[in-house]
Image (cartoon, rainbow, N blue to C red):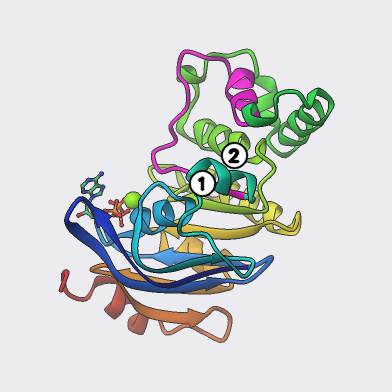
């Protein structure tokens, strides 16, 4: 479904990605792992069009989308749940969710049923729907951030470190929620620093280091942790 082919990208003249390639098959759950500053968020931003691709291709369902603007990529089904659990703090939980459906605001019935769908998936958000989003716990904010993305009816969700800074019990809840989204038929690309969580739920992993894919492996037939750790922790940018 998504093919990232040797992309080079960065900020201004600084190159951050030096030819990143990865594949996410339809219905798959792929994890992109790596340490701080290795280019994980930049990769997701390049996929959704928030960072320009200088070389290489982003291919969605067989179509090169390098030149498609970010808003249009959203209508092609791509949705990013950004790092940092950002929510509109001055707005209620429900208003935040409705923002996710802003581009199809005339579809009242569809929006109402999608809202109900998000509330079923995250009952805590329903309980707190009138609450100012700034008052939510970290876990609740992450759920809200995912819920808001779902309101855009994506076919592919890109999640940037959804487990960061959350208690283990909440990380488990988020992991369950992500598996639930996979069962719903969504295609998922998950950026994580929590290797254990990623190995628990992903079917394929990539490790990025210094803007390059350093390791790639199918999950399942016993990933050698030492081998993974060597790529994950070994060395700095090159
Ligand atoms: N807007 C920006 N302008 C300039 N440089 C940036 C910008 N955003 C990120 N960078 C730099 O690009 C590099 C990769 O950043 P990126 O956010 O992709 O890393 P990351 O793997 O997501 O790290 P983390 O795990 O800390 O979120 C870093 O050196 C970072 O300082
Ligand atoms: Mg990041």
Residue 234, percent across and down? 21, 76
Q: Residues within 10 Å of mark 1 (few under 14, many from 20)?
A: many
Mark 2, residue position: 149
In the image, residue 158 above or below residue 232: above
In the image, residue 63 above or below residue 161: below
Mark 1, residue position: 80
- Looking at mark 2, is its residue's CB closer than 8 Å to ligand 2? no
Residue 137, percent across and down? 48, 27
Residue 146 on the magenta span? no
Disc 1 versus disc 2: distance between alpha carbons? Answer: 7 Å
Q: Secondary structure at mark 2?
A: helix
In the image, residue 74 above or below residue 20: above
Question: Would you say the residues marked 1 and 2 are in contact, meaning their CB atoms lie under 8 Å apart?
Answer: yes
Residue 184, percent across and down? 76, 54
The quadrant the N terminus occupies is bottom right
User: Residue at the location (47% across, 73% down)?
Assistant: 22
Residue extent of the magenta highlight: 78-101
User: Residue at the location (64% across, 20% down)?
Assistant: 94
Of callouts 1 and 2, which one flags the residue occurring earlier in the amino acid sequence?
A: 1
Residue 88 on the magenta span? yes
Residue 104, percent across and down? 70, 30
Q: Secondary structure at mark 1?
A: strand
């Amino acid at each position: 479904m998504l093919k990232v082919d040797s992309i080079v990208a960065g900020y201004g003249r600084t190159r951050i990605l030096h030819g990143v390639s990865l594949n996410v098959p339809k219905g798959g759950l792929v994890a992109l792992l790596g340490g701080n500053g290795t280019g994980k968020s930049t990769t997701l931003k390049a996929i959704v069009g928030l960072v320009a691709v200088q070389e290489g291709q982003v291919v969605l369902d067989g179509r090169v989308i390098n030149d498609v603007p970010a808003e249009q990529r959203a209508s092609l089904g791509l949705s990013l749940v950004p790092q940092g659990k950002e929510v509109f703090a001055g707005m209620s939980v429900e208003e935040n969710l409705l923002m996710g459906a802003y581009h199809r605001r005339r579809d009242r019935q569809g929006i109402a049923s999608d809202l109900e769908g998000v509330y079923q998936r995250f009952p805590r958000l329903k309980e707190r729907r009138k609450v100012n989003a700034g008052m939510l716990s970290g876990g609740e904010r992450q759920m809200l951030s995912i819920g808001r993305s779902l309101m855009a009816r994506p076919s592919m969700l890109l999640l940037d470190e959804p487990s960061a800074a959350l208690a283990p019990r909440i990380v488990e809840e988020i992991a369950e929620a992500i598996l639930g989204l996979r069962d719903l038929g969504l295609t998922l690309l998950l950026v994580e620093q929590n290797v254990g969580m990623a190995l628990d739920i992903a079917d394929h992993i990539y490790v990025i280091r210094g803007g390059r894919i350093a390791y790639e492996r199918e999950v399942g037939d016993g990933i050698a942790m030492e081998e993974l750790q060597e790529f994950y922790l070994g060395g700095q940018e090159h």
